[in-house]
Amino acid sequence: MIRTPAPVVILISGRGSNLRSIVEHRQRGELAIDIRAVISNKPDADGLRFAQAAGLPTAVVDHRDFASREAYERALMQQIDRHAPALVVLAGFMRVLGNAFVAHYHGRMINIHPSLLPAFPGLDTHARALAAGVKTHGASVHFVTEAVDGGPVILQAGMPVTADDTPASLAARVLREEHRIYPIAIRWFVEGRVTLRGDTLYVDGRPQSGPVQA
Ligand code: GRF
């Protein structure tokens, strides 16, 4: 069966290594997506330069240009919706999103987070995981809902924490897993294998009570 590539918009704020991984999977023919735009809230994001070099359409919607979060998010929504995406992919997009924005993309916006959610939502996850003395750590891909880093988890990858780990060593190992699992989750979504109905995650038509381990 020939599948039409699903239109996707990717939001970034910085380095863009997850963006790069997604693009590389697409280039290898492993991800049937059409990246309609890469949008950053930061004009100097390294990921924007990568996207431009890769020939992808880019846009900047700088939150500092708007008087309120509502105005910013309305403008961002307009930019995104011009491309009629089937999926909005947050790849290191470092803005907390308001309820109207999140509701607008309910069931079609996903995020990657560097922890085994629901453990360690928010920032500095690697240092917090070490301080808490956890034995395993990892990364999660989840649908975005009103609760920050709190939506249903689609896929996660865990790894042991070792005695000599530092936040940097842990971050590097987790990032490798992020680069592996985000394209998988995106593929499942565009193949229709993963859906969100209400607040319930369905994989292959079955309601899930927990994330799939990858
Ligand atoms: C990643 O660790 C991701 O999990 C988090 O922000 C970081 C983005 O990294 N949401 P990059 O911009 O994809 O390199």
Image (spheres, rainbow, N blue to C red):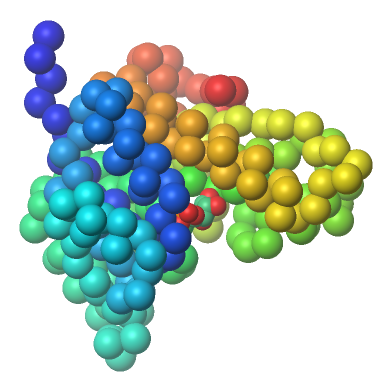
Which quadrant, please, contains the C terminus? top right
The image shows residue 213 at horizontal and vertical percentages of 59, 23
Q: Is residue 116 left or right of residue 134?
A: left
Q: In the image shown, does 104 or 1 lie closer to the viewer?
A: 1
Q: Is residue 33 left or right of residue 50?
A: left
Which quadrant, please, contains the N terminus? top left
In the figure, 67 relative to 46: above or below? Answer: below
Query: Which quadrant holds residue 22?
Result: top left
Query: Which quadrant holds residue 67?
Result: bottom left
The image shows residue 95 at horizontal and vertical percentages of 44, 68
Q: Residue furthest bottom?
A: 67
User: In the rendered picture of this protein, how many numbered marks are placed on residues?
Assistant: 0
Residue 74 is at least partly visible in this image = no
Q: In the image shown, does 158 or 28 lie closer to the viewer?
A: 28
Q: In the image shown, does 88 or 202 lie closer to the viewer?
A: 88
Residue 69 is at least partly visible in this image = yes
- Residue under the point 29% across and 63% down: 49
- Residue under the point 28% across and 86% down: 66
Q: Residue furthest top?
A: 1
The image shows residue 202 at horizontal and vertical percentages of 41, 23
In the figure, 91 relative to 44: above or below? Answer: above
Q: In the image shown, does 206 or 184 lie closer to the viewer?
A: 184
- Residue under the point 66% across and 50% down: 171
- Residue under the point 34% across and 86% down: 64
Q: Is residue 18 left or right of residue 139?
A: left
The image shows residue 172 at horizontal and vertical percentages of 64, 47
